[in-house]
Image (cartoon, rainbow, N blue to C red):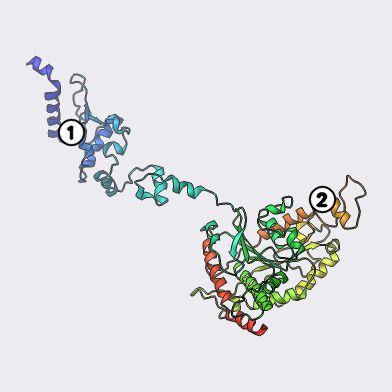
Amino acid sequence: MSESGHSQPGMYGQGRRRRRRRDRDPGPPAQNLSGPSRDRDYVPRERRDGSEEPTGPLLQKTPIILAKPPGERSKPSVPASGAPSLEKPIMLIKTRDEGGKPGNPSDVAPSVSGAGTAKLEREGQRPTQPVYQIQNRGMGSAASGGAVDPVIGQTKLLPPEKMKHSIKLVDDQMNWCDSAMEYLRDQTDMLVVGVIGLQGTGKSTIMSLLSANSPEEDQRAYVFRAQTQEIKERAGNQSSGIDFYITQERVIFLDTQPILSPSILDHLINNDRKLPPEYNLPHTYVEMQSLQITAFLFTVCHVVIVIQDWFTDINLYRFLQTAEMLKPSTPSASHDSTGSSGADDGSEYYPHIVFLQNKARREEFCPRNLKKMHMAVDKLMAHSHLKYKGTLSMLDCNIFPGLNRDYLETEVNLFLLPMMENDGEDALTRAGSGPPLFSLLPGYRGHPSFSSLVSKFRSQILAMSRSQLSHTILTEKNWFHYAARIWDGVKKSSALSEYSRLLS
């Protein structure tokens, strides 16, 4: 008997201990239990709650039972209350290949697919999940089995594609182009800047300097192509239709063909181009093209820059007021019609308009002459709904250090830019002033340099308020579709057709 008792302690000894634990009435938990013993006590308590035991993974692997030899176990002590205390419970330890540490809830019921995950969700516990899976699920690729899609992740982190040159928004046949759609994104923080002006005033050059280029660069590398020497000699126009360019700062620039252009009229007459059936005379068609483009810019732009190279042409202000009169009404929130009537003035949208005096002479920077120019523009635009004052100031740019804001009683959005010259001495020589008296000192121009003034002008344009173009907030892509509807409405406008009939 002694040999059989010592030779098989694990088989019979363990059975007797288990029967003795089941027969004993469970009492209060012992106070001298160690940390791992409490973890062992957690298992039967959880199973006595009535919840079903996890099936599958918990029964697949044989647990390891650790116990002290019979000689080292102390006899049960009887507390003062008279109830026998429990022996030190046997601790269950998971195998190492399952990972996890003793004491974690995952030791008892690991988070697995199927019954284990469903049990944890019923008990109000969230199954453990790696962080990358949560982020991937938010990116919409949870159907790929929980793995991270590197293509989608990199696409969302890539910067917007940078344009190298301008593209067509409206071609020379006045047709809408869709090539600009691929450069637009689903974000609302954008600024739309358009430009109009007579032929040869420097519209494309100014728009290139405001968007992506500097005066020191070669003009052949500008994003909006400027007039070449050959085009200047034959008095032609470089731009046709509307050109589109968007910067990395999400500013959309729209360069347009010259309004009331004599070169376009000459091209229509000499090449015998067939006019649309609604136009009888070429000069009527040229004027209506200019009005369509200007009315379109007044509807889809936050800022419209009017460039002129001498002060001032009274016919230009008459043209602006005519385009404002024929401007399509802002579509209401209930429908997307683009008719030219049916909306109140209070709900109509009008952009900021900035008058840029390009190629300004030295005497035009005189404070007295500057004040007269502001008063003239204010009188000419007094009855306009366009926002022609209060958003741009040359006095805030420290161009005239001795003048305060009270000097200009009626300050309008007027800015002056001198001739763009790369060499100051050559500019002074061509102006008739001769070389400077001292070669080491800069010559007196009467104004800051061209580069400095362009930088100040660009800062003020980009700081313009980005008011809401329609009754709904537009993203870049929504703006593109909105502008396409407006352009289609401008071409089919009954008011423009009636005005064209009166001209002919």
Residue 470 in view, yes or no: yes
Residue furthest to the front: 271
- Helix, strand or loop at label 2? It is loop
Residue 465 in view, yes or no: no
Q: Indicate left or right for 130 with 79 as reference.
A: right
The numbered dot on residue 83 is 1
The residue to which callout 2 is attached is: 423
Rendered image quadrant of residue 286:
bottom right
Rendered image quadrant of residue 224:
bottom right
Q: Residue at image x 52%, y 62%?
A: 477
In this orientation, which residue lies closer to the viewer: 8 or 350?
350
Q: Quadrant of the C terminus?
A: bottom right
Q: Position of residue 116 (x, y in %)?
A: 26, 43
Q: Position of residue 293 (x, y in %)?
A: 63, 71
Above or below for 442 versus 272: above
- Tell me the distance, in whole angstroms, between the alpha carbons under discs 1 and 2: 106 Å
Q: Indicate left or right for 90 with 306 as reference.
A: left
Q: Position of residue 169 (x, y in %)?
A: 58, 64
Mark 1–mark 2 CB contact (< 8 Å): no
Three-letter code, disc 2: Asp
Residue furthest to the right: 437
- Helix, strand or loop at label 1? It is loop
Three-letter code, disc 1: Ala
Q: Residue at image x 61%, y 78%?
A: 345
Q: Indicate left or right for 91 with 138 as reference.
A: left
Q: Earlier in the sequence, mark 1 or mark 2?
A: 1
Q: Nearer the viewer, mark 1 or mark 2?
A: 2
Q: Residues within 10 Å of mark 2 (few under 14, many from 20)?
A: few
Q: Residue at image x 63%, y 69%?
A: 297
Q: Quadrant of the N terminus?
A: top left
The numbered dot on residue 456 is none
